[in-house]
Image (spheres, rainbow, N blue to C red):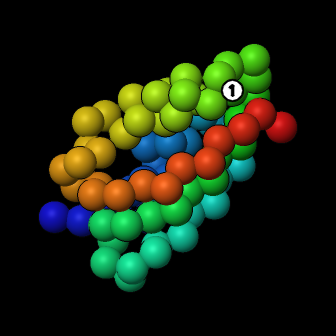
Amino acid sequence: MAMSATELETYIRQAFPDAQIKIDDLAGDGDHYACSVISEAFKGLSRVKQHQLVYQALQGHMGGKLHALALQTSAP
C-alpha cells in the first residue's frame, strides 16, 4: 500500500505546523518521494536530528506505506 503526497504532507504538517513543505513523487507510484521541509523547529539541530524528527512525524510508516524518501531539511 502506497502513501499519497497529501497524506505525507499531513503527517509532516502535524509535527511542524510552520513548515514550508515541497514534495515530489519521483516514480509516480506513491512509494518514492523527494521532500524538502523548512521549519523553525530545526534551528540549531544537526541534519541527522532534523531527519530523525521528520521520520518520527511519519509515525512508523517509513519502510511500510512509504518505501523511499529523499529528505532535505533546514531552518529558515
Figure check: 16 above or below 30: above
Q: Is residue 54 left or right of residue 29?
A: right
Residue at screen point 62% across, 48% down: 72
Task: Return the x and y of residue 70 as percentages of the image width and height.
Answer: 49, 56
Return the residue nearer the eye: 7 or 64.
64
Snapshot quadrant of residue 24: bottom right
Badge 1: residue crowd in 10 Å (few <14, some 14–19, many ≥20): many
Residue at screen point 39% across, 29% down: 56
Amino acid marked by disc 1: Phe
The secondary structure type at the circle numbered 1 is helix
Q: Quadrant of the N terminus?
A: bottom left
Residue closest to the far top? 44
Snapshot quadrant of residue 28: bottom left
Figure check: 42 above or below 11: above
Q: Is residue 2 left or right of residue 69?
A: left
Task: Return the x and y of residue 66 as percentages of the image width and height.
Answer: 29, 55
Residue 14 seen in the current view: no
Return the residue nearer the eye: 38 or 19.
38
Residue at screen point 75% across, 28% down: 40
Q: Which residue is mark 1?
A: 42
Task: Return the x and y of residue 38 as percentages of the image width and height.
Answer: 71, 42
Residue 67 seen in the current view: yes
